[in-house]
Image (tube, helix red, strand yellow):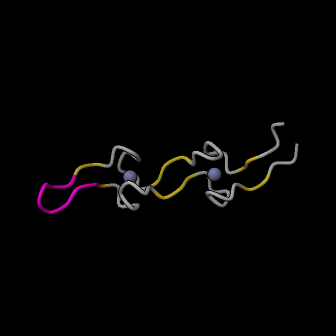
Amino acid sequence: MAATTCPTCQGKGVIGCKNCNGSGQTGNLLIGYSKCSRCGGLGEHACPNCRGTGEVGGAK
Ligand SMILES: [Zn+2]
Ligand SMILES: [Zn+2]
């Protein structure tokens, strides 16, 4: 039952978005920037490993 700090997000529950490298925007000067669809412009999103809880394990 002991939960362990998620190694993916170091227990933060969120991880930096690789899609936009944390900038919250994708694109470039040529095509223009748009809000990153992966993180919704936040630059980070809920950790897929722990689903945003910051802990893994415990459940069976
Ligand atoms: Zn993003
Ligand atoms: Zn995590």
- State the extent of the magenta-drawn residues as a range: 26-33
Which residue shows up at 62% across the image and 57% down it?
A: 8
Q: Going by the picture, which residue comes out furthest to the right?
A: 1
Q: Give the quadrant of the N terminus.
A: top right
Q: Position of residue 22 (x, y in %)?
A: 40, 60
Which residue shows up at 81% across the image and 48% down it?
A: 3
Question: Is residue 16 located in the magenta-colored stretch of the structure?
Answer: no
The chief SS type of the magenta part is: strand
Q: Does residue 21 appear left or right of residue 5 in this picture?
A: left
Residue 5's image quarter?
A: bottom right
Q: Position of residue 52 (x, y in %)?
A: 61, 45
Q: Which of 8 and 34 lies nearest the eye of the viewer?
A: 8
Q: Give the quadrant of the C terminus.
A: top right
Residue 43's image quarter?
A: bottom left
Which residue shows up at 56% across the image and 52% down it?
A: 14
Which residue shows up at 35% across the image and 55% down it?
A: 24
